[in-house]
Amino acid sequence: MANLSVKNLHVSIEENEILKGLDLEIKGGEIHAIMGPNGTGKSTLAYSLMGHPAYDIVDGQVLFDGEDLLEMGPDERSRAGLFLAFQYPVSIPGVTVANFLRTAVNARRRAENPDDKGISILEFRKMLKEKMDLLKMDHAFAGRYLNEGFSGGEKKRAEILQMATLQPKIAILDETDSGLDIDALRIVSDGVNALAGPEMGVLVITHYQRLLNYIKPDYVHIMFDGRIVESGGPELALKLEEEGYDWIREKYEAVAA
Amino acid sequence: MTNKKVVIKTGRKVASAKAFNFTAEMVDSANPVLGSYRAEAWSAFEQTPMPTIQDEAWRRTDLREMPLDRFRIPEAGAHNDLPPVPDELLKPIVDADAHGGQVTLLPGGSEISLDPELAAKGVVFTDFKTAEKEHPELLQKLIGNIVRAEDGKFAALAAALSQNGVLLYVPRNVQVEAPLHSVLWGPGADLAHFSHVIVQIEAGASATYVHEVASPTESLDAHTLYAGLVEINVADGANLRFVELQSWGDHVWNFSHERASVGRDANLDWIFGAIGSRLTKNFSDLDLIGRGAEGRMSGFYFADGTQHLDHDTQQNHLVPNTSSDLLFKGALKDKSRSVWQGMIHVAPGAQKTDGYQANRNLILSEEARADSIPGLEISADDVRCTHGATIGKIDPEPLFYLRSRGIPQEDAERLVVEGFFDPIMQRIPFEGVRKRFQQAIKDKLD
């Protein structure tokens, strides 16, 4: 069973401490949600776990299936089974979705076996079509340049398509609901739910409760000022929905200050 | 985009070299077919001063370190003692199973072949030595029509001293389906290679022609000179796809003067690929001389090490209702440098001109540099001319994104560079040529 274990994580950007001792444990088959007001470090957590070079790990430990995640480059983290669905996926001009995904699939195969010749075009196409059908995507999508001119909904769907293709052990969804209309939200959520299961653990990062109506979390954490300050079940998300974040601010601002 | 300029003064002397060792005796002026052309070119060479950075076209390309006195013309049969052409270069690089014909020019020798069916239709695809014997009038009629020896020092030099060349002639209304292929192979150190390519596509005819110049890289202190001419005439209603691939060794000083004339309702699709040479100065001019003429110029270049590639293009709209479309894309690594200087010229009265030019550069290291100088010179009032130039670096965010999907750093860089070149690849009609460019990208990034 996959296991992501974050202990006392401190992260800075340009000498500015954003994460101030964060603890979190996610296992395969579990769905966790992290909620919190803007600017509390939710996206910093996502980027730091994926290994973005702009984030300095000042202190703490992250183990992924017992291995030191922080020692790995972003590509190694991915191949180890970690996935991040970006809030703002960048476009890669001139590189088609299919070419990109085939390169990603082959990178995995080659990491396991350096002599691997790569997935056959036919096998790859078949797989890609299945995944696109799962997300109700037009097959022509495979021939478009990655994220280039994609609508907000298309970008998010493309992220989930990548998740479906790479089959991670732990997937982090960073504000995947932002910019989605209700239909796109449903399709993306259905896709995530179809993939989630005993094999995959999910960490949903969101500002709003809305997404959690579609992707039902087992655990909800509230993040404030670089730490997880409250943890509980789905009822915690409903409390936030009703009461907003003010009570969190009142309760923890003094401590933070 | 900021351009950091660091000037370092060193005590190193510019090892500039006296003068070329070429003499009038080396000019084959007794040749019954081309003798007088060559003799005239020689006198143009003697009268034309060596270009310097004071000349506008040469401002960014400095020849002072070129050891002029080291170059000598290979003897007849010299190729027998030099590395042979790699089989890879002679393999069909186009989709068809085979070439319609192939000409291989070697130092002091040549090999030619042409599909007999094409020969029966009157197609000529051969080297100059053969053409002098078999098609002397044709050669005499066509030589020097498009590019003049007076166009430059190196144009004159190539015109005077190229003992061999390629002649492609396609008669009226003949369609040549299978691509034609020629290779100029220029191995060896301290040699001078010259060549001259003449292409005449008669009215209503069509052809696809791939021309390559190549050599291995000799030792670091070796120098070789190449000067070449390309003269293309696409007559009324004719079509030509012309692909040029330059993969000289890193020791070659490469100069070429090329010009294509495109007639009424005729079409030229001109593709350049440049990955080799120590230094390149290439002049490529497109003359649209008949109404409805169309020309497209697509350039791919990738420099590394200390390579210096300078492409000078000119799109001349000389009559009304013509269109041109130029896209040159280049990547630069290490301490390499590229120059692209382009001009769209619209002659007085050339109304309804549609001209486009764009140059995009991707800088892959701190020390590489690209200069991009677009230009418009318009003397008509009802035209549409646009241009653009960009010089950019590889972005860290796309690289992180690709790596976050398990793609190692090097593969991620390669994907981004391939993506950058994709608009050029889309313009190349042959899988084989695209593969050649993709291989070049891989080799250069390794």
Image (cartoon, coloured by chain):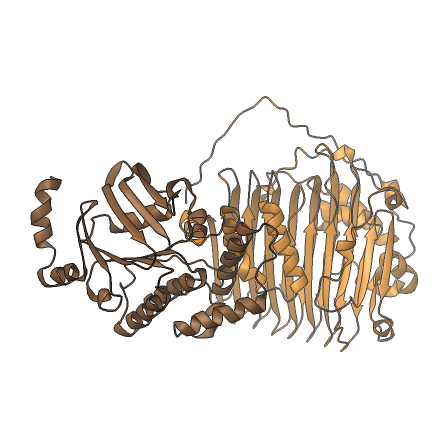
Please say whether residue B380 is visible from this viewpoint: yes
Closer-to-camera residue (B59/B361): B361
Closer-to-camera residue (A118/B102): A118
Corner quadrant of residue A170: bottom left
Closer-to-camera residue (A194/B435): A194
Quadrant in the picture for the N terminus of chain B: top left
Q: Is residue B62 above or below residue B385?
A: above
Please say whether residue B375 is visible from this viewpoint: no
Q: Is residue B266 left or right of residue B75?
A: left
Residue, x 12% and y 55% (percent of image)?
A245
Residue B383 position within the rendered picture, expressed as x and y whole percent measured from the top left:
49, 68
Q: Is residue B409 above or below residue B97?
A: above
Residue B422 position within the rendered picture, expressed as x and y whole percent measured from the top left:
54, 60
Residue, x 62% and y 37% (percent of image)?
B62
Residue B158 position within the rendered picture, expressed as x and y whole percent measured from the top left:
77, 48
Q: Is residue B373 left or right of residue B121?
A: left
Corner quadrant of residue A8: top left
Q: Is residue B302 above or below residue B220?
A: below
Q: Is residue A73 left or right of residue A177?
A: right
Closer-to-camera residue (B105/A251): A251
Quadrant in the picture for the C terminus of chain B: top right
Among the chains, which one is orange?
Answer: B
Which residue, as the protein is rendered here, is positioned at the far front? A1
Q: Chain A takes which shade in the image?
A: brown
Residue, x 75% and y 62% (percent of image)?
B92
